Image (cartoon, rainbow, N blue to C red):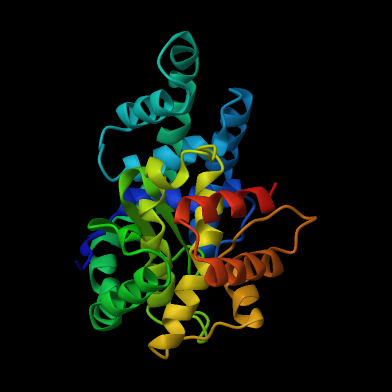
Amino acid sequence: MATEVNWRPHPLVSVLHAVCALCHKATLADTRLSEALQAPASQLAADIAAAHLPAERFWGHLIPLAAQIENRRQLVETALAKTIGRGPRLDAVLATLATSLAAVDAAARPLMAPWTEELALRQRPLREQWEARGPGLLTQIGYLTEESLLVANCEVLLVHPALGGGGEAHLAYNSVRIEAVLANPVSELPEVVRLAWLISQLQLDLPKYSESIHADRLPHIARFAMLPATLLAAQTVELSRYTPEAVQLAISTWRLRSPPDIDAATAVSQWWQTYQEARPPWNIALTALDRMFG
């Protein structure tokens, strides 16, 4: 069954996407946006750290929830509740984080006004490529792994190209965000391949696949787990190649972080070779990859 994709341009998710990148010390390609957001982003990062929040978990809820909740204070409250639960600790940090988010919103608002219309136009190239190649890519990924890994439906949140190419999968929300670039930043890795890779991760939070993996590690493991199958699928439809160099290029271009003492490209390639030879159930393969990354 083909995955049903719902496309949504989203200005607030665009802002938080850029702020999250700044909080991770990334350099934005959009210098105006970087100048506008640098100070409030730094303050938000400092407030998250001062509150001793698990930052990755918090961002993992805040950004996709922004596509569902318009009220900024309610957005922060819901993200906090999903991150640390409700109770005195939430009450203690809610006001501070809501104020920080309001400052981010105020700084970005002068730039956000044209984004809805711009994103609606910018989505066209990627959407056309997806409609032509996306279903075939996902079918191949399912064939190379397990067909049940393919999600039935998902939401694609199109965001302003703050980084000149970027995206993330939100497993708990059946959504992905991807920058609406007009051309492929790296010709060897078309953005439609990145989108297939993001969508292919969404089913991995089902307990039957990942119950033995800590929830905070799962997004990291999911990124690497679906990388070889995506590149092989792209090779099948003549969009990219599966080679050691292509794996390394994808890790770099798609900004996959790994421990400094691990050669991630070699590790994931060896893991994939073992998987192809033995074809264990996917939950066993995923657990093995998790152990490889320590």
From this viewpoint, which residue is outermost toward the right? 261
In the image: residue 95, left or right of residue 255: left
From the top left corner, tell me how far across and down residue 204 is, in percent: 41, 51
Q: Is residue 113 above or below residue 102?
A: below
From the top left corner, tell me how far across and down residue 229 is, in percent: 47, 72
Q: Nearer the viewer, residue 148 or 46?
A: 148
Image quarter of the N terminus:
bottom left
From this viewpoint, which residue is outermost toward the top? 88
Q: Is residue 127 visible?
A: yes
Q: Nearer the viewer, residue 282 or 56?
A: 282
Residue at horizontal 37%, vertical 24%? Answer: 77
Residue at horizontal 45%, vertical 42%? Answer: 60
Instruction: Indicate the quadrant where residue 81 lies.
Output: top left
Instruction: Indicate the quadrant where residue 262 lies.
Output: bottom right
From the top left corner, tell me how far across and down residue 161 is, in percent: 43, 66
From this viewpoint, which residue is outermost toward the bottom? 238
Residue at horizontal 53%, vertical 82%? Answer: 186
From the top left corner, tell me how far across and down residue 33 is, in percent: 48, 57
Q: Is residue 210 above or below residue 157?
A: above
Instruction: Indicate the quadrant where residue 151 lies.
Output: bottom left
